[in-house]
Image (tube, rainbow, N blue to C red):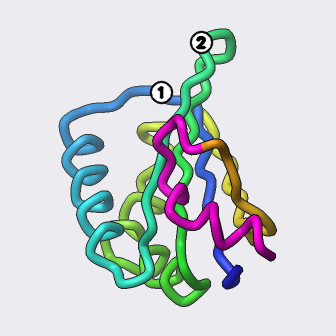
């Protein structure tokens, strides 16, 4: 399997105003336009209120392209107005597999991963 990466952004929302949602949409469109973007998923933990967005990338260069995008840089500068804390985890994906019965951004890579 080729080397793939994930970037997980976990955060506690403080107040999501119209500017937050607009900037979030710009970042989402930017991510999807970057060659090497493989997909994303989001999770919310109702007991803690934390939200996690996981982005999948074909390369570290693709991930870096989003991190240096002007909208992403702006969001990092303004995060204190919208968030009550955050954590980012960048990880190398070692393996990806499943039985194919649920949709996942990396599902198409599953067969390759089981041969690795």
- The CA distance from mark 1 to mark 2 is 15 Å
Q: Earlier in the sequence, mark 1 or mark 2?
A: 1
Label ID, residue 56? none
Q: Is 106 one of the magenta-colored residues?
A: yes
Magenta region: 100-116
> Which quadrant does the N terminus fall into?
bottom right
Q: Quadrant of residue 17?
A: top left
Q: Is residue 115 left or right of residue 75?
A: right
Which residue bears the numbered disc 1? 14
Q: Is residue 103 left or right of residue 11?
A: left
Q: Nearer the viewer, mark 1 or mark 2?
A: 2
Question: In the rendering, at what x and y percent does residue 103 appear?
Answer: 46, 42
Number of residues whose C-alpha sits closer than 10 Å to that of mark 1, classed few (under 14), some (14–19) or many (20 or more): few
Label ID, residue 46? 2
Q: Residue at x 59, y 18 (%)?
A: 49
Q: Residue at x 67, y 10 (%)?
A: 47
> Which quadrant does the C terminus fall into?
bottom right
Q: Residue at x 53, y 36 (%)?
A: 101
Question: In the rendering, at what x and y percent does residue 57 appear?
Answer: 53, 73
Relative to residue 25, is residue 115 depicted above or below?
below
Identify which residue, 94 or 33, lies in the foreground.
94
Q: Is residue 87 left or right of residue 41?
A: right
Q: Residue at x 59, y 12 (%)?
A: 46
Identify which residue, 60 or 36, lies in the foreground.
36
Could you say whether the residue bearing mark 1 is in a helix, strand or loop?
loop
Q: Is 55 one of the magenta-colored residues?
A: no
Number of residues whose C-alpha sits closer than 10 Å to that of mark 2, classed few (under 14), some (14–19) or many (20 or more): few
Question: In the rendering, at what x and y percent does residue 79 appear?
Answer: 47, 49
| Residue with the most extreme bottom position | 61
Question: In the rendering, at what x and y percent does residue 81 appear?
Answer: 43, 40
């Amino acid at each position: 399997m080729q080397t793939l990466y994930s970037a997980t952004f976990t955060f506690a929302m403080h107040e999501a105003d119209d500017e937050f949602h607009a900037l979030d949409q710009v970042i989402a469109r930017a991510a999807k336009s970057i060659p090497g973007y493989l997909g994303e998923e989001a999770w919310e933990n109702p007991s803690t209120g934390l939200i996690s967005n996981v982005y999948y990338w074909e390369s570290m260069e693709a991930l870096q392209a989003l991190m240096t995008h002007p909208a992403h840089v702006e969001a990092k500068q303004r995060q204190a107005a919208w968030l009550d804390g955050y954590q980012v985890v960048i990880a190398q994906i070692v393996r990806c597999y499943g039985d194919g019965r649920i949709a996942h951004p990396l599902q198409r890579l599953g067969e390759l991963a089981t041969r690795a």
